[in-house]
Image: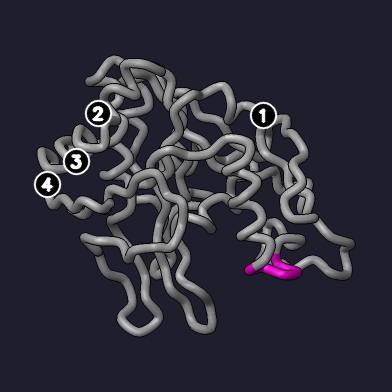
Amino acid sequence: MFYTSSNYQDFFGNLDLFGIKSEIHNNKSVLIKINLSGVYKENFPRTDMKILKNTIDYIYKNGGICAITEGANGYLRNNLVASGLEKTLKHYEIKIIDADMEDFEEIISYGERHYIPKFFKSYPFRIAIPAASKRKDMYYSNNIKLFVGAVPRKMYQLDDAQISGHAPRPRLHQDLDVSIANLFHAIEKYSPFHVYINGGLSFNENKGEFRFVCAPVCALRLRASVPSVW
């Protein structure tokens, strides 16, 4: 099921419709996985900071607390501050967890070894806020590919001769489509995410950057999706 929103009030109302308020009341601690391995560059959108801020406001308004995570090689807090979220981080005293710096557990997913941060299980309710893009000769990137940044990059390296300078986790790129699917299944097995909030700045190879209201329907076992744009 998909709901769309074009303003702050509708966004909160849609989260209510999905029952997120009761989940926050019951579980209190919420983990938010974002896409922010680096700060925004033109034609390389990241998680929309307004959507992230509004999600955080909603969580605390309803009595919860949250942590924000992404694999950013130790620079996640710097990236969030540079993206304009410093005031919100200080106001709520939000915990920032760089997944590249954390302990992990090995999960076998369809014959591939993947390494999922152990702290994911410390948060009973988990929300994903990806960024969307469609690039030349690539598949549409959104909810599933978000988890490439969830795993520690040190466990996804190759021999020096094989390393690509454009791929922080080059082992995933040996058979990218299969590895991303297997990683998603590993996440689902170990610590599935309950809500996917899509929207904000996006990129398409033909039209460039744009802001979208509704994400395309995906044939995935997504528990909820709340497309949004401002």
The secondary structure that most of the magenta stretch takes on is helix
Q: In the rendered image, which residue does mark 3 sit on? A: 14
Q: How far apart are marks 3 and 4 (CA)?
A: 11 Å
Magenta stretch contains residue 140: no
> How crowded is the residue under tag 2: few (<14 C-alpha within 10 Å), some, or many (20+)?
many
Question: Residue 57's x, y, as percent?
Answer: 25, 28
Mark 3: amino acid: Asn
> How crowded is the residue under tag 1: few (<14 C-alpha within 10 Å), some, or many (20+)?
some
- The disc at residue 58 is 2
Q: How far apart are marks 3 and 2 (CA)?
A: 11 Å
Q: How far apart are marks 1 and 3 (CA)?
A: 30 Å
> How crowded is the residue under tag 4: few (<14 C-alpha within 10 Å), some, or many (20+)?
few
Mark 4: amino acid: Asn
Question: Residue 167's x, y, as percent?
Answer: 67, 63
Q: In the rendered image, which residue does mark 1 sit on? A: 118
Whether residue 71 can be seen here: no
Q: Give the range drawn in magenta.
A: 173-177
Please tell me whether mark 4 or mark 1 is closer to you in this view: 1
In the structure shown, which secondary structural element does the residue marked by tag 1 occupy? helix
Q: Earlier in the sequence, mark 3 or mark 2?
A: 3
Q: Earlier in the sequence, mark 4 or mark 1?
A: 4
Q: In the rendered image, which residue does mark 4 sit on? A: 7
With respect to residue 14, does 144 lie above or below? below
Residue at image coords 74%, 34%: 105
In the structure shown, which secondary structural element does the residue marked by tag 3 occupy? helix
Mark 2: amino acid: Tyr
Residue at image coords 63%, 36%: 190
